[in-house]
Image: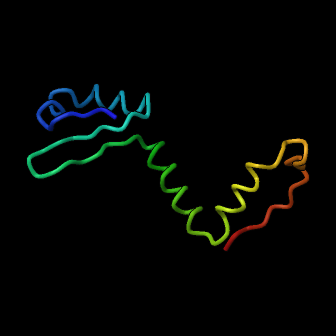
Amino acid sequence: MINVNVTNLRKNLYGILEQTIKYNEPVNISTKNGNAIIISEEDYKGIVETLYLSSIPGMKEKIMEGMDTPLDECIPEAEVEWQCMK
């Protein structure tokens, strides 16, 4: 994580944002009143997706089970019967 004070952020805003986007490196901005974090849109979307999946009862366990399943025991994607979640 990059740490920068608000004065240096103002001076280098474009470069810091470019680095955050290119390398997904969060930026901790310190001010007199507290700190704030800048993250890339990609990281933000990942966090939102993780929170969404975590909100579905039993989803974490299904994901962990899937991660522990050897690839040779998995069925091909073309044979998967997709279900819409409501």
Residue 79 vertical placement versus 55 (above, below) = above
* Residue 56 picture quarter: bottom right
The x and y percentages for residue 46 are 51, 49
The quadrant in which the C terminus is found is bottom right
Residue 35 vertical placement versus 81 (above, below) = above
The x and y percentages for residue 82 are 80, 61
Left or right of residue 82, residue 57 in this image: left
Left or right of residue 73, residue 62 in this image: left
The x and y percentages for residue 35 are 20, 48
Which residue is drawn at the image coordinates 25% and 34% (left, top)? 3
Q: 17 or 51, which is in the foreground?
A: 51
* Residue 71 picture quarter: top right
Left or right of residue 66, residue 60 in this image: left
Which residue is drawn at the image coordinates 63% and 72% (left, top)? 57
* Residue 14 picture quarter: top left
The quadrant in which the N terminus is found is top left
Q: Residue furthest left?
A: 32
Which residue is drawn at the image coordinates 44% and 29% (left, top)? 23
Q: How many marks?
A: 0
Q: 39 or 18, which is in the foreground?
A: 39
Which residue is drawn at the image coordinates 23% and 31% (left, top)? 13
Residue 16 vertical placement versus 41 (above, below) = above
The x and y percentages for residue 38 are 31, 43
